[in-house]
Amino acid sequence: MQRFVMAIDQGTTSTRCIVFDQNARLVAVAQREHRQYHPRPGWVEQDAVEIWRNVDRIMPQALRQSGITAAQVVALGIANQRETFVLWDRHTGVPVGRAIVWEDIRTEELVAELGEKPGIEEVRDRCGLPLATYFSAPSLRWMLDHVPGLREKAERGDVLFGTMDTWLIWNLTGGVNGGLHVTDVTNASRTMLMNLSTRQWDPVLLEFFGVPASMLPEIRPSTEISGTTTRVVPGISITAALGDQHAALFGQTCFEKGSIKGTYGTGGFLLMNTGTELVRSKHGLLTTIGYQIGGEPAYALEGSIAVAGSLVQWFRDNLGLIHSAPEIETLARTVKDNGGCYIVPAFSGLFAPHWLAQARGLVVGLTSYINKGHLARAVLEATGWQTREVVDAMNADLGTPTPALKVDGGMTADHLLMQFIADVLDVPVMRPLVAETVSLGAAYAAGLAAGFWPDLEGLRRNWHLAARWNPVMDARHREDEYANWKRAVELTFAWARSTPSS
Amino acid sequence: MLRLLARGSGHHGLTEIADSLGLARGTAHGILRTLQRVEFVEQDQSTGRYRLGAALLHLGTSYLDANELRSKSINWADTLAARSGQEVRIGMHHDGAVLVVHHVFRPDDSVQTLGIGAMLPLHATALGKVLLAYDPALSAAARQRELTSLTRRTITRPQALERVLTEVRAQGWAGEAEEYLPGEASIAAPIRVPGGLVVGAIGVSGAADRLCDSAGRPRATLVRQVVQAAEAVTTSLVDEN
């Protein structure tokens, strides 16, 4: 009987269920999108029940598609959108309101207030993250402050907190009938409530954010989830869970210290494995857990680019200069260079390594010579230079330069961009054969836990190169262009300073 | 003007066009130049006469951007490489040759060079034969030119090429063994946009002894995988429209 591993990728816009065979080849994919709710400006919510129902449909669908039975599935791994969480009643399984999504910025004021509180430096030291609306703790505090009676119920343990991995595992393992209330270290490391060194909920952090410990799930290593499904498709072992970007790091087999993966979608997410060493960034990066297989965690540094593919979408939808996103490359190739034009897409501030919320985007270097081809180049180059800034910060924090960048995500189809990234980093850019690295990472972790794959070396043998872009740019030209980009970025700071506050 | 060009012989001189439409020659020339720029009109290099251009054929149907084709086919090309164990290319016609718009390495982790942007001969590669087989104007033009001999197996006689192209249309895929490079073979199948127009080809290439059986025929398993990949890409193009 042939055996398989199943992965659920619970993403920001959709949930996917993918089946892999032992050679890590994709056998079936089932997918369902869920609604995004925007009840007020800056608020972003999702219906956790809708997401659960989608899982209920796609799991059997993926089995049907691959023509296998549940008995042939040796393990299930879950990867999920990070920071997004839901609260629910332990006794009824009914959520308290909708899930608050990582993109939600309702806590801007709260975050500013918390930032003034004594002990804020201690917070960063313990959890590795800067205080921002992005992470779960501020939004959780907001819920506790705004939903009448919630805090009391939470303190009594009647209301549970969970990131999306926790919500799905609780439901899959029985829900109100003894569902497991657990999370993995990578998801917990994004809440601002976990201590990076002990990898447990930290009393100081809980006190700082005013969160009762009674509502939080048990934190386990990524491959020690140890649950069994009793609903949807009963009898499947749930053996692993990871945040989606951590799953991608694992799926890319970035197991060595210093190896980096970059996922290019709407935004760009770069993670560097720093091994067993907890590196506290001096260059604007986040410290997080890469993954934990067994006893020792692999730590990671993370640099997020807020606007990557979304700049291409903006170019298409708001400027109307192209009909489809891939056409940006066609347009960019109508000219040989950027003509001196640079676009800094600080649409909602700059993320790593600058972390400047007030920065706003700009286009500089306009002359009568500039046409839409140059603008298209500048759009693609913006993602290249932002990658360079993050990788420079990673190299500086670790003290050794990375030898290559492993890439995945939709934008890897852009040949011009991938070549440009190789050129500005001056290291090869490599794309693996399996583009679904998030699902693959969850499957790998699950299969490893179940003994389906023997060890990390066995997984590495499954990784095959689909494309490699080698740097060809002249060194002097690269440094001149980088200097121009840095000047453009500085101008966004100046603009932020000169904007009168309301 | 386009209606005039669509009538009769389809080949008209500038004076003829200007007189027929009652336009000054300068005005007619300006309009023709504009139409030529968007490829709605072509000018015959030898006679200087005008005719309707290729871009008009794509009106209403979705003419496919090369980068868009790569973006939409990337997962299927990866799957083909994983299943076949061979390197995969997607080609489109450009300027009398096959333009490689996408390339996936052979998944054996050997050192390989990314071949996106390379130009391959139409008559000597499986990708090229597919493009020729489904484009009458292109194959007519190819027959007019000299078919360059690249190996001792390259098809150089127009009649022989025409016979092969008829066979390609009948079986729905093309093969080639040692016609482009000694020791190398390739297999390809057509990618269509809604309406049936063939816009590109997807195929595998590699050592002839891996791709062909002992009789020198492309292996049936590989042919099936290539045809399935081409159909999957075609379906994904329909889905989007």
Image (cartoon, helix red, strand yellow):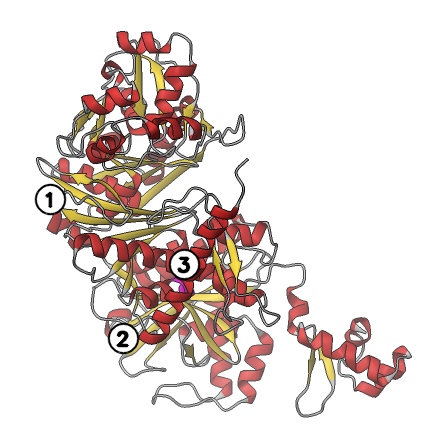
Mark-to-mark CA distance, 1 and 2: 48 Å
- The tag earlier along the polypeptide, 1 or 3, is 1
Residues at badges 1 and 3 in contact (C-beta under 8 Å)? no
Q: Nearer the viewer, residue B115 or A303?
A: A303
Which quadrant would residue B114 be assigned to in this image?
A: bottom left
As shown in the figure, which amino acid type bears the numbered disc 1? Thr
Label 3: chain letter: A
Furthest toward the right, the residue is B22
Q: Nearer the viewer, mark 3 or mark 2?
A: 3
Residue at mark 1 shares a chain with residue at mark 3 = yes
Q: Position of residue A283 (x, y in %)?
A: 26, 50
Q: Chain of mark 2?
A: B
Instruction: Identify the mark at residue A276; answer none if there is no mark.
Output: 1
In front: label 1 or label 3: 1
Circle on res. B208: 2
Q: Amino acid at mark 2?
A: Ala
Above/below status of A478 relative to A317: below
Asked if residue B98 lies in the magenta stretch, the reply is no
Residue at 34% x, 29% y is A116
Question: Residue under mark 1: which chain is it in?
Answer: A
Residue B128, x across and y down, in percent: 45, 75
Q: Residues within 10 Å of mark 2 (few under 14, many from 20)?
A: many
Which residue occupies the foreground of this view, A202 or B206?
A202
Viewer-nearest of labels 1 and 2? 1
Judged from the image, the secondary structure of the residue bearing numbered disc 1 is loop
Res A413 label: 3
Answer yes or no: is residue A360 visible: no
Q: Around disc 1, counting alpha carbons within 10 Å, would you say few (fewer than 14), some (14 to 19), or many (20 or more)?
A: some
In the image, the segment drawn in magenta is A413-417
Q: CA distance from mark 3 to mark 2?
A: 29 Å
Three-letter amino acid code of the residue under disc 3 = Ala
